[in-house]
Amino acid sequence: MPNAAHNNNMAVFMNLFRREKRGDEPHVRRRPAYNGAISAKALNDIFDGCSDFQSRDIRPGLSGERTLFVCWLDGVASGGEISKDVLRPLTELLRAGVALSPQRLLDGAVYSSQAALRTNLDDTVGDITRGCCAVVFEAEKCAVCFENRSAQIQRGISEPTLEKSLKGGKDSFTETLRTDTALVRKRIANPALKIKSTLLGRKSMTQAAILYVDGVADPAVVAELEKRINNINVDGALSTGIIEEYVTDRPRSVFPQVLHTERPDRFARQLLNGRVGLLIDGIPIAFLVPVTFPEFLRVPQEDSQNYVVSSALSIIRWTAVLLALALPAFYTAIAMYHQEMIPTQLLLSVITSKQDVPFSTALELIGMLVAFELLQEAGLRLPDPIGDTVSIIGALIVGQSAVEAKVISPIAVIVVATAGIAGYAQPSQDLGAALRISRFALVLAAIAAGLYGVVISLCFFVWYLCTIDSFGRNYTAPWSGGRRRNLVRTFLRRPLPEEKMREPELNTPDRRKQA
């Protein structure tokens, strides 16, 4: 009976971090459906109260026997292009007495690269909100929509700001979906690159695209991602967090389970490796799944450097992970419970610096870690010039003054600063945030039980990572593969001519990536 109770408690604990089975979630329509016949009155009623909704009635020549209703959203669609490419050709044809029909417009009577015939009101409204101009034929109960999106609401392609490029491409994703897909298509000029379009948000109707390389990506992962995207039932998909918490296996976990990138070259490389990508209109960040923990320690320029240099930098980054996670906890445990582990000269220096400090080591470390987080938040939230000033004042003036006033000891400042710098060495800021939170937990364990608490917490840390899955792939792969070679390639990179196979944990149909 005690074993049964223990198993039940463990099941309840694990369920706190697991999402419900998506098979039980109902599939809902992500935006409202507009029913009825396509007409000028129906469109005017739907867009009633929208000051940017523009429309015109065009009559044929002098007869006035028929009226064409043309409408668009000002600002989303370009008024100049509509006047030149749609209104002008229509009026010239009507004045010449040419009988207009939907098919004639589709055959080229209007100067537009993209034209679509819509026979239901729902599709017509969707095209208008996405920057199309609709020409309504009420007698035929249809509309012809021409794409005339405004260039004023599109940001130009710029250099990446989060992922600095040394030897790679200098372009980054933008807030425009079609621009982003074109950047990927530029790098993978192959029909095998598939792009599946969908909509997110019942109210926002945000466009999204799932990208993968056919024959390389696992079809099960593609189907699962598409299923999870279709089951998102929110009003608007306007931030990365909304997407992540609905598509990850453990939405309550602090560790990132989706790989972010703003660089099209890194995105294309991961697609060729067998991962599946997601691009969302309005978000200049791309998502990649499935993902493993070691992938967050890799940087895009690894393949652009010598393999010895890349391996050395990889080891430095993994060392930084250990320092950012466990250095404050180890110092707290040794200073409070295991002073005999400190060399004599260092111990004398620590005792001298701690003699006049009124606070205990535990309170000192916790206070310094909290102050470090406050300084970081202040630097991020304030404008750049003020944020830099606050960081300098907080780190130099206040820190130095606190040491000279005997409020904190210099060794505590050194430990916290070293752990903070190591946290900044992480390529993924999401991983760095997870390490900062875990660092507090390890410090509390060190305060409670010394090195025993730290070791037990690290064991729990590793065990918890092993319980996470990402689209059916183990989060700790390739460590969990059971092969020594997989463990070595986590830290070291072989010369590229010798890397002939794709990562086995991705389960790609085509394992070989070079001859």
Image (cartoon, helix red, strand yellow):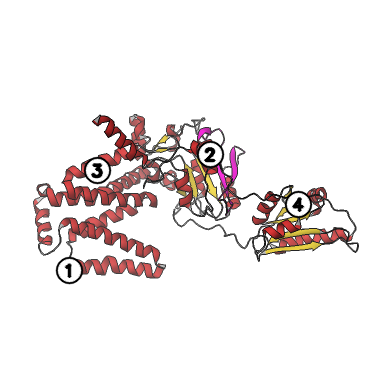
Which residue is rendered at x = 10% and y = 58% of the image? 351
Q: Earlier in the sequence, mark 4 or mark 3?
A: 4
Which of the numbered marks, if any, corresponds to residue 404? Answer: 1
Q: CA distance from mark 4 to mark 1?
A: 77 Å
| Element type where label 2 sits in the image | helix
Image-based side of 180 in relation to 364, left or right: right
Which of the numbered marks, if any, corresponds to residue 143? Answer: 4
Instruction: Give the residue number, with chain letter if any, for mark 3.
Output: 457
Q: Are marks 2 and 3 in contact (CB under 8 Å)?
A: no
| Element type where label 4 sits in the image | strand
Judge depth for marks 3 and 1 and give the one in front: 3
**Amino acid found under the numbered disc labelled 4:** Ala
**Amino acid found under the numbered disc labelled 3:** Ser
Residue 352 lies in what quarter of the image? bottom left
Q: Earlier in the sequence, mark 3 or mark 1?
A: 1
Q: Earlier in the sequence, mark 4 or mark 1?
A: 4
